[in-house]
Amino acid sequence: MNKNIIKITAVLGFASVLLTSCSKENPPLVYFPDMYFPVAYDPLMKAEDAYSKHENEIPLFAANAGATGLSPVDGTVSQNKDGVIDEEGNPKNVDEYNAAYDKSKTLTASPLNPKNLEKDLERGKILFDHTCAACHGTGGDGQGPIVQSGAYSGVPNYKDREITVGSVHYVLSHGRNAMGSYAGQLNPGDRWRVAMYVMNAFKAGAVPAAAPATDAAPKADDKPATEENNTNTKK
């Protein structure tokens, strides 16, 4: 009899522990925080729960003063490893678009490191062949397989266009005429690589060569021009 009482007491005690520990107010483990705690609309603010006064805090949020906008986790793959930022922004109307497009034609060099020119052009070709050649053709003549099939027409030949690396990048970012934007498919650095490849392959190599390495130390007799060693300086 005593053994049965002990067993019943143990079962009831264990059940009560489970029921109290798994309440909505104090869940033991939080696998999906959004199901238990509200997330602020402003990621720099702490969310307030008007319906509960729980004391639980998500450790990462608590360490960040309650803000839900956290830094990327270590090991996260960067979506903009080149650090290139499109400064022109999105045009709001036709006039802004045309003005920014005309301005982009004045850009004759990409912001990427010129020392990586060869690798950038190699990647630019791969991206062009995968993303652009279906319409523009691998030769940039506007005779890609989609055009040749008769499903689409009006794709220009790059050789007949007055373009710069800046204008090609702008069209890749914002689209033009029947061509849509490819900002969702190509990150900023890769859009510059495609533009560089287009200019190099189809516009007679209109991309500046990579800067030569300057590892050699200056010679001892290479002195800067001063009033003492410059014979052309007037005294």
Image (cartoon, rainbow, N blue to C red):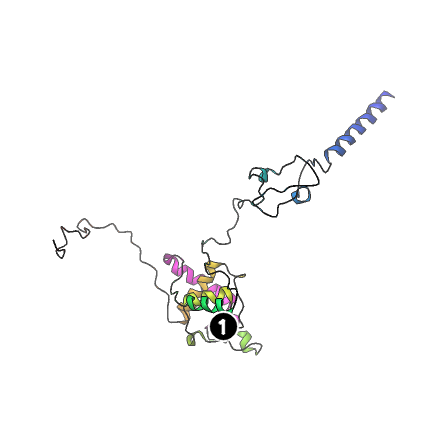
Does any portion of residue 197 appear in the rendered image? no
Residue 120 position within the rendered picture, expressed as x and y whole percent measured from the top left: 42, 60
Residue 22 position within the rendered picture, expressed as x and y whole percent measured from the top left: 73, 36
Who's the residue at 79% across and 26% down the image?
Answer: 10
Q: Quadrant of the N terminus?
A: top right
Residue 144 position within the rendered picture, expressed as x and y whole percent measured from the top left: 51, 74
Residue furthest right as drawn: 1
Q: Image height check: is 72 above or below 62?
A: below
Nearer to me, 64 or 16? 64
| Amino acid type shown at disc 1 | His
- Count every numbered label the image shows and give the total: 1
Q: Is residue 125 magenta?
A: yes
Does any portion of residue 17 appear in the rendered image? yes
Q: Secondary structure at mark 1?
A: helix
Nearer to me, 107 or 207? 107
Q: Is residue 95 magenta?
A: no
Instruction: Tell me if mark 1 has few (under 14), some (14-19) or many (20+) residues whose alpha carbon lies within 10 angstroms of its own.
Output: many
Residue furthest top as drawn: 2
Residue ID for mark 1: 136
Overall secondary structure of the magenta stretch?
helix
Q: Is residue 222 left or right of residue 186?
A: left
Report which quarter residue 113 is drawn in: bottom left
Report which quarter residue 35 is drawn in: top right
Residue 222 position within the rendered picture, expressed as x and y whole percent measured from the top left: 19, 51
Who's the residue at 46% across and 65% down the image?
Answer: 170
Q: Which residues are magenta?
A: 112-140
Q: Image height check: is 232 above or below 206?
A: above
